[in-house]
Amino acid sequence: MFRWNKAKPKKKKTAHVRKEPPKPYTPPDIPKFTKQSEKAKPKEENRVSPEKAFMDTFRQLTSCHRSIDIWQDFVVMSACSISNAVDKAESHYTKREERYMRIIKKYRPEEQKLFPELLAHFVMVMEENPEQDFLGKLYMTLGLYDSHSGQVFTPYHVCQMMADISMGDTLKEEIDRKGYVTISDPCCGAGATLIAGAHAAKKLMEKEHLNFQNHVLVSAQDIDELVALMCYLQISLLGVAGYVKVGNSLTDPIRNGDSLENYWFTPMYFSDVWHTRRVVSQMMDILREERESDDH
């Protein structure tokens, strides 16, 4: 029996293919969802500054009225609105409410709507840059000041320099002694000196971890009601506790027992901290009077 030797089939040579390592897994891109407010947010280059918005609204009103009349009515009505929202004293609440209604009725309905817009733009101006005398600067720029009486406001940067010089080591000592410091200006104008002083005190108090709203009291007075109310508006929006008196600081200065008719108290003045201080002060005055009467 013959066995045939079959030739083994030759293996085909295959080219060696180099295998590449697997690529790392990358998750699919997830679309980012933006909030509706972010979508609607206007581009920075197209944004109108609140200062320009204020002047545009102001010019709409001055097209049919004198600039000084619009300015005065805006200041008085804004002051009455802020005051009557927090100060319900019978000596002036009703009078200020009637004064507001008497002024606003002079204008047409479409003009009446512009005054709240002016106030809103003013609030935005002070929100973006609180370290300025916005109303005072604009009042002088528009030429609304009383040049016959020599009315000139101190530039704000000069007030800043004076505030930085005046606020020193005695500030902390005063707060430790009676709990707060009083910044007073008997000829306040639009309040540039008081604004600069409040910010200088704020910077020093922040180093001591103190809230300046609880430890700074502003006392102001001016014979010109218009500029005194301009001061009142600006320190109110800064969140400073204090008051402005309209009157002559030489013949009728601020003193205890005054009639409150010409006083304008800021909203922060009615906070719990300052209310408690007034109650304690009144109690101390009563005890002091009783002690003096016993001595006599």
Image (cartoon, grey):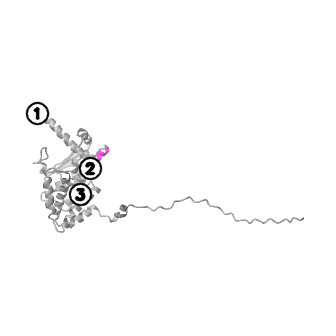
Tell me if 62 is positioned left or right of 128 in this view: left
- Amino acid found under the numbered disc labelled 2: His
Q: Specify the segment rendered in magenta.
A: 199-207
Q: Position of residue 258 (x, y in %)?
A: 12, 46
Asked which secondary structure carries label 1, the reply is helix
- Label 2: element kind: helix
Q: Is residue 153 visible?
A: no
Disc 1 to disc 2: CB gap under 8 Å? no
Residue 229 placement (x, y as % from top left) = 17, 55
- CA gap between label 1 and label 2 equals 43 Å
Q: Which residue is mark 2?
A: 199
Which residue lies most toward the bottom here?
63
User: Was residue 203 drawn as part of the magenta stretch in this picture?
Assistant: yes
The residue under label 1 is 293
Q: Taken as a whole, is the magenta stretch helix, strand or loop? A: helix
Instruction: Say what amino acid the circle numbered 3 marks.
Output: Phe
Q: CA distance from mark 2 to mark 3?
A: 15 Å
**Mark 3: which secondary structure?**
helix
Q: Reply above or below: 281 against 11.
A: above
